[in-house]
Image (cartoon, grey):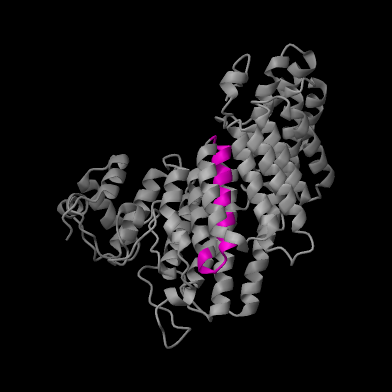
Amino acid sequence: MGNEANTRLADLFGLTGWSKGELARLVNRQAGAMGHAQLATDTSRVRRWIDTGESPRDPVPKVLAALFTERLGRVVTIEDLGFDRRRQTGRRQTGDGLALSQPERTAEVLTEFTGMDLMLNRRGLVGAGAVLASGSVLSAAMYEWLHTDPALAADAPVLDDPLHAEPAAYDRYEAAPLGSQEIESLEHSVEVFRAWDASRGGGLQRKAVVGQLNEVGGMLSYRHPPQLQGRLWGVAANLAVLAGWMSHDVGLEPTAQRYFVLAAHAAREAGDRPRAGEALSRAARQMVHLNRPDEALELMDLARAGAREGAPPRARAMMRTIEAWAQAAMGRGQAVRRTLGEAEELFVSGYGDAPQPSWMQNFDEADLHGMHALAYRTLADFDPAAAAQAQVHAKRALELRTDGHERSMIFDYLSLAAACFIDDDPGQADHWTRQALRTIGQTSSHRTWDRLYETYRHSERYAGDRRIQGLRAEIEAVMPRRKPVRSPRETTRDKGDGRMPV
């Protein structure tokens, strides 16, 4: 028994509105439904969990995690409840509850988190009560972890049989050995999911990706030969990044952030530091989208340091473009131009190198120009002269786009349209906005609607123009009725409030 209150459990318990007696009854009922009819919990035991830090025995932590997940409408893991699954002591942990020296721990949390996420999908719940961690908190929690460099073999227990599987502490996928062909099929599935996301957005396939990641998490409980185990961790990292990106694309921001962190852990277990850095750069890009550019820059510092010089030039170019976007959101024009110049140099220097890793295949020259356009368009909120540069890069990006990148094309159209409004060219702005409107309904990406809203607010100054009046009416007719992500300069640059009914 502990002697200090479990503040994590107490805080979450306070959000549920349950009484201690009600929680005890729910635990007994849920445990029975999960095949543990012999389990009996009462009010006094619940009180000890909260007030004295007593840790319940298995399967109670899993039962509690399921109950809190359903009640709060967001994923709640065993660690979120303040319970150490294996009651280990003397191990340092990161801020998200993952033990620093135990690949099995990462696999357990990954499997549990994806399982809870799937449960929320099945029951139609959303993560409205989840909280997005700040970039500062993530950076502080992961800095020391990312700068240690234990190999997978050094982390793992010494086993006579390399194919030994330790019994799981809770229900999980029935682990079995995999061969190279099976892992190759899993690697191919990542490419299929990635292509679908680029074309149609994250909404339609997110659950399939999370389900595949849940299966892979279970597979990782079986200790395969090092080469295969490393490839399997790589699959987990790629799927976790994709699950995070798809979650971000549909507005599940705290869920997305957790997947990006899990992806960094999985990449580290795979021995792929550049992949870990790229996963963290996704979290930084998310922060810029949510108008937290200062926190994005902190995460980018961590991402670059974590990737080290092992990242190929094009990967470092991609990271520079994210930094430039964050700098643009803070109005730092000189820094934006310098950082984008570095990105161009790195990108060009990457030609002729060894083949790019699979996770960099979508960052091509079109994406380079698309990110330039986005950064300059964002900077134009502070310095209207940057709008001309945004137009040049957006047009070049559109020239280079190929089939299968419809979502990126919508972003290019909207960057171009907003830049034209800022550059006092409403005719061209009307044209490019209508190009986006032709295809925006064919994707399941909430981010495209957020960008459309930015274009809408820039059209406010031309609301007296009959043509723009019609355009604004069309946008209002198709825009989802939800609160959009808004620009950090929105209230200071608009002549009116620029808002539409949401």
| Picture quadrant where residue 109 is located | bottom left
User: Can residue 212 be seen?
Assistant: no
Left or right side of 405 for 145: left
* Above or below for 73 versus 149: above
Q: Nearer the viewer, residue 385 or 419?
A: 385
Q: Residue furthest right?
A: 399
Left or right side of 425 for 226: left
Left or right side of 184 for 99: left
| Picture quadrant where residue 316 is located | bottom right
Q: Nearer the viewer, residue 227 or 217?
A: 227
Q: Which residues are magenta?
A: 268-291
* Residue at horizontal 81 percent and vertical 50 percent from the top: 402
* Residue at horizontal 48 percent and vertical 53 percent from the top: 117
Q: Main secondary structure of the magenta part?
A: helix
* Residue at horizontal 26 percent and vertical 47 percent from the top: 7
* Residue at horizontal 54 percent and vertical 75 percent from the top: 229
Left or right side of 472 for 27: left
Picture coordinates of residue 136, whole percent (x, y): 44, 44
The quarter in which the N terminus is drawn is: bottom left
Q: Nearer the viewer, residue 258 or 283?
A: 283
Picture coordinates of residue 141, whole percent (x, y): 41, 52
* Residue 408 is inside the magenta segment: no
* Above or below for 445 versus 166: above
Picture coordinates of residue 431, whole percent (x, y): 82, 27
* Residue 283 is inside the magenta segment: yes
The quarter in which the C terminus is drawn is: top right
* Above or below for 210 versus 389: below
Q: Residue furthest top?
A: 464
